[in-house]
Image (cartoon, helix red, strand yellow):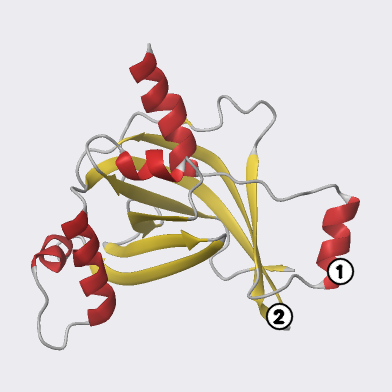
């Protein structure tokens, strides 16, 4: 496999939730269906102003994503109302519908460094490695707060999160390699882990 065109890069996301963190609390109960919303930014503070607004849904283990791009200045207007001929009109209607269902506001900022690999000849197969996972309570649209909390601080020995993505079935060579290395699927939520360690634990004290 080969490193993709972006190489090692920073991903920062602001997760939206209700004041009592209802979305992430429900997600952590492992329901059949769950959904969340995030604003994502790629690169460091000099990387421009393009944001990606994304609804992520999971039903019976299958992930569905609905995403559109905008600038930081366009984001508030995107939530207000649509306009004739707007870009990704259907996706933006779905985002407005979700915000109409829930009392959503910025809840957490999650950041990490990612390296993504692709397989020549099988473009649908990707393997990503995330490291230096960190998070903190969100303050509006501030993607670069000063004080971070280590998301993996309660996971001794865990340094990376590896995610394997493929459209239907993993190739046989990869299945054999994973089996030889005794690598098995495990559920892991960056936002969920930060919430458990930094919000719920403090609330229960």
**Residue 39 as seen in the image, left or right of residue 191:** left
Q: CA distance from mark 1 to mark 2?
A: 13 Å
**Residue 38 as seen in the image, left or right of residue 170:** left
Quarter of the figure that contains the C terminus = top left
- Dividing the picture into quarters, in which one does residue 80 lie? bottom left
Q: Which residue is mark 2?
A: 122
**Residue 63 as seen in the image, left or right of residue 135:** right
- The image shows residue 149 at horizontal and vertical percentages of 43, 28
SS category of the residue bearing label 1: helix
- The image shows residue 39 at horizontal and vertical percentages of 31, 56
- The image shows residue 32 at horizontal and vertical percentages of 50, 55
Image height of 35 relative to 121, above or below: above
> How many residues crowd mark 1 within 10 Å: few (<14), some (14–19), many (20+)?
few
Q: Residue at x 46, y 26 (%)?
A: 197
Q: Earlier in the sequence, mark 1 or mark 2?
A: 2
Quarter of the figure that contains the N terminus = bottom right
Tell me if label 1 and label 2 are in contact, CB under 8 Å: no
């Amino acid at each position: 496999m080969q490193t993709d065109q972006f190489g090692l890069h920073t991903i920062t996301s602001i997760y939206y939730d209700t004041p009592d963190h209802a979305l992430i609390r429900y997600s952590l109960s492992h329901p059949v269906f769950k959904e969340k919303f995030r604003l994502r930014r790629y690169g460091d503070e000099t990387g421009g102003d393009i944001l990606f607004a994304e609804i992520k849904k999971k039903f019976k283990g299958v992930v569905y994503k609905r995403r559109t791009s905008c600038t930081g200045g366009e984001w508030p207007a995107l939530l207000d109302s649509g306009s004739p001929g707007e870009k990704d009109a259907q996706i933006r209607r779905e985002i407005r519908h979700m915000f109409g269902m829930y009392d959503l506001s910025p809840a957490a900022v999650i950041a990490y460094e990612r390296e993504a690999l692709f397989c020549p000849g099988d473009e649908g197969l990707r393997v990503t490695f995330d490291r230096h996972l960190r998070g903190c309570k969100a303050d509006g649209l501030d993607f670069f707060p000063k004080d971070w909390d280590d998301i993996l601080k309660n996971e001794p020995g865990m340094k990376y999160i590896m995610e394997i993505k493929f459209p239907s079935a993993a190739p046989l060579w990869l299945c054999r390699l994973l089996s030889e290395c005794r690598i098995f699927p495990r559920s892991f939520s960056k936002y969920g882990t930060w919430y458990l360690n930094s919000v719920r634990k403090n609330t229960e004290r």
